[in-house]
Amino acid sequence: MEERQDGRIEFETDDNEKISFYVLEETMINGKNYLLVADSDEEDGEAEAFIMRAVTDDEKQTVYEMVEEDTEFEAVSKIFAELLEDVDFEI
């Protein structure tokens, strides 16, 4: 994960592709760190958002992966919805 000058955070995929997101919020739940990220910083428009979870890789470095399991996603999205009152989540 690398921060860019325009405020986005850059991630590298398993395929070595670089993608960037704006971090909207961060929280810790049950000892796990989660990020709410979006592909746009447009406040008045719709942005595609994702929830990412911090995990430790084989080299003991912290990396982030997309939360894809429905139960975990729903639980974490409720927390982010409480933190950000003006955000609606669609699954």
Image (spheres, rainbow, N blue to C red):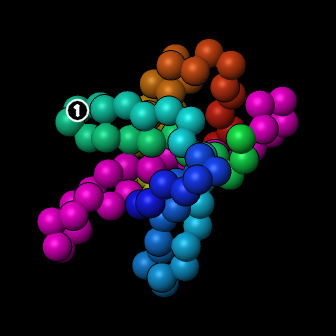
Task: Name the spot of residue 90 as percent of width and height, x first.
Answer: 68, 38
Q: Which x, y percent locates residue 82?
A: 52, 17
Q: How many marks?
A: 1
Q: Nearer the viewer, residue 83 or 7?
A: 7
Helix, strand or loop at mark 1: loop
Dot 1 alpha-carbon crowd within 10 angstroms: few under 14, some 14 to 19, many 20 or more:
few
Residue 42, given in percent of the width and then of the height, sits at 78, 38
Q: Amino acid at mark 1?
A: Asn
Could you say which is closer to the camera, residue 49 or residue 68?
Answer: 49
The residue that appears at 68% across and 19% down in the rendered structure is: 86
> Would residue 57 be counted in the magenta stretch?
yes
Q: What residue do we see at 21% from left, 64% from top?
A: 61
Compared to 13, does 64 lie above or below?
above
**Residue 34 position in % (x across, y down):** 38, 41
What is the span of residues highlighted in magenta in the rendered image? 42-64
Which residue is nearer to you in this view: 69 or 15? Answer: 15
Tell which residue pokes out farthest to the right in this image. Answer: 45
Residue receiving disc 1: 30
Q: Is residue 70 visible?
A: no
Asked if residue 88 is positioned above or below residue 1 in the image, the reply reads above
